[in-house]
Image (cartoon, rainbow, N blue to C red):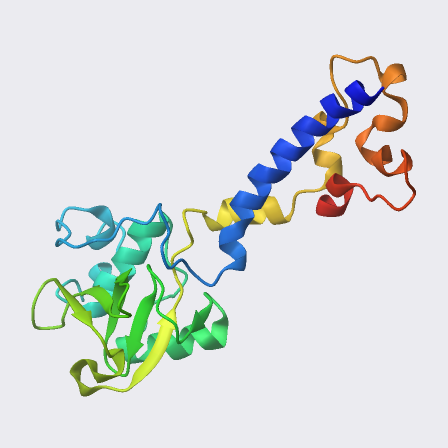
């Protein structure tokens, strides 16, 4: 009987491990050293859809790169693989717009993939270095198309007021996948309810919904708790 229970628990543990890994990006503000994050340290080609009129809202509305918001918009699109939630606006408006609408988490700590926001400028954090300095990629309205710079003090950048960071990087999880995981219900995961190689009558009290009835009344079904 113990062997049968073990067979049933294995797929549950594997499934929960996968789910926990997938859900982790939602609970963290952003990612200081995300292994999946690829920093952009070279200029994007103008033919890349995220930065061109094909997908870039700023390009479509007549304000393409060189332009800090056009670049930041394209970079968010590029690193997340989905349309940015921030619906336009100028550089000085991004932080306040995001804070008011709750598009992305925000704060004062630099994280890779975050949008650094000043009173008249935005840039993307590409690296948070061991010495505390921050490497950013950016574009400039009426100036350089693209450049990469490292700052020890972000508040002194261009002498503008520094507002904070918008944690736009989603760690590789699209909003669609995130919502599917959040909305998952126990009844939609019946394939994990029992070992398919064991007849239902032999499973008995070792079905997922009855795991807490074996050995101790205090033990709670992990699967049921996760999906309830």
Task: Please give the name of the residue rendered at 40% of the width and 58% of the height, measured from the top-left corner.
Answer: 31
How many labels were placed on the picture? 0
Task: Please give the name of the residue rendered at 37% of the width and 51% of the height, measured from the top-left corner.
Answer: 34
Q: In which image quadrant can residue 126 be found?
A: bottom left
Picture coordinates of residue 74, whole percent (x, y): 26, 57
Picture coordinates of residue 170, whole percent (x, y): 42, 54
Task: Please give the name of the residue rendered at 66% of the width and 34% of the height, measured from the top-left corner.
Answer: 13
| Pick the front one: 111 or 183 | 111
Picture coordinates of residue 225, whole percent (x, y): 76, 46
Q: Does residue 193 sit above or below 138 in this rendering? A: above
Q: Does residue 59 sit above or below 156 in this rendering? A: above
Image check: 121 left or right of 17?
A: left
Picture coordinates of residue 131, whole percent (x, y): 26, 68
Regarding residue 16, the answer to whether it shows in the image is yes
View extreme (left): residue: 143
Q: In which image quadrant can residue 168 be found?
A: bottom left
Regarding residue 58, the answer to whether it shows in the image is no
Image check: 205 left or right of 59?
A: right
Q: Does residue 91 sit above or below 36 in this rendering? A: below
Q: In which image quadrant can residue 60 be found?
A: bottom left
* Quadrant showing the N terminus: top right
Image check: 68 left or right of 214?
A: left
Task: Please give the name of the residue rendered at 27% of the width and 83% of the height, measured from the top-left corner.
Answer: 119
| Pick the front one: 160 or 110 | 110
């Amino acid at each position: 009987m113990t062997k049968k229970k073990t067979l049933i628990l294995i797929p549950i543990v594997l499934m929960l491990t996968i789910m926990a890994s997938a859900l982790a990006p939602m609970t963290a503000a952003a990612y200081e050293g995300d292994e999946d994050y690829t920093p952009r340290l070279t200029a994007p080609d103008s033919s890349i859809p995220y930065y061109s009129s094909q997908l870039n809202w700023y390009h479509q509305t007549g304000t393409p790169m060189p332009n800090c918001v056009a670049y930041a918009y394209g970079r968010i699109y590029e690193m997340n693989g989905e349309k940015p939630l921030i619906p336009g606006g100028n550089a000085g408006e991004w932080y306040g717009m995001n804070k008011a609408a709750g598009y992305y988490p925000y704060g004062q700590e630099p994280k890779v993939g975050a949008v650094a926001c000043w009173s008249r400028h935005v840039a993307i954090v590409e690296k948070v270095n061991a010495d505390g300095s921050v490497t950013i990629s950016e574009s400039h309205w009426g100036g350089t198309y693209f450049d990469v710079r490292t700052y020890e003090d972000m508040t002194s950048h261009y002498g503008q007021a520094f507002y904070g960071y918008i944690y736009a990087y989603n760690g590789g999880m699209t909003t669609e996948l995130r919502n599917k995981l959040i909305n998952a219900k126990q009844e939609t995961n019946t394939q994990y309810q029992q070992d398919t190689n064991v007849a239902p009558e032999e499973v008995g009290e070792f079905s997922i919904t009855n795991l807490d009835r074996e050995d101790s009344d205090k033990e709670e079904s992990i699967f049921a708790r996760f999906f309830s």
